[in-house]
Image (cartoon, rainbow, N blue to C red):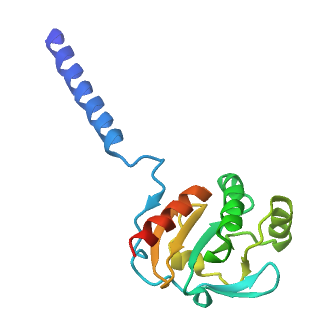
Amino acid sequence: MKGRRAPIIAGIVGIAVLALVALFALAPSSDEKADSSPLIGNVAPALEGTTLTGDEFDIDEHRGQWVVVNFFATWCPPCVQEHPELVEFAERSGDSAQLVSVAFDDTEVDKVQEFFAENGGEWPVITAGADGASLDYGVKKLPESFLVDPSGEVVVKINGGVTADQLDAMIAERTEGS
């Protein structure tokens, strides 16, 4: 009886291993940045707040241009890694696109100011007044960005860090299709 159990157990283990391999093979790659979101295809949720400079930001005032809404935190290593790419994107895009960052769970505005002073970036950074924005946008893990087209519709949700080239390509792809 003992001699007959070994092949059965080996078969069960083999099937389990194959099932795990199949599961991992079919799972989305961590390189896949774009994500599905109930926001895609809908008008972007309201996004209003006070920026680092004390100005008021309202996403609705940017209709007619592309807007990249970036949720970040100064304590988030992937956000720090992504930041130079956002600086490059903002510099390259000029007036054709508006980048706005939303400080997520960064309660000390001084740290956010220090971060931008040290790392660059001349775009609006909302630090107050947008408390429900992360819920409205369904933010799960930082960094997350949303690409909003000139009509105000969310067209892409990006999980994790994004590069300037990726943002340019996403905009170009959607602009050519218009």
Which residue is nearer to you in this view: 2 or 169? 169
Position of 56 relative to 12 (above/below)? below
Which residue is nearer to you in this view: 154 or 66? 66
Which residue is nearer to you in this view: 87 or 159? 87
Q: Residue furthest top?
A: 3
The quarter of the rendered structure image containing the N terminus is top left
81 lies left or right of 16: right
- From the top left corner, tell me how far across and down residue 122 is, in percent: 77, 71
Specify the quadrant of the image occupied by residue 56. Answer: bottom right
55 lies left or right of 152: right
76 lies left or right of 110: left
Q: Residue at x 57, y 81 (%)?
A: 65
Specify the quadrant of the image occupied by residue 105. Answer: bottom right
Q: Residue at x 59, y 79 (%)?
A: 133
Q: State whether residue 162 appears in this view.
A: no
- From the top left corner, tell me how far across and down residue 149 is, in percent: 49, 78
Q: State whether residue 144 appears in this view.
A: yes
- Disc count in the image? 0
Position of 61 relative to 97 (above/below)? below
Q: Residue at x 40, y 65 (%)?
A: 36
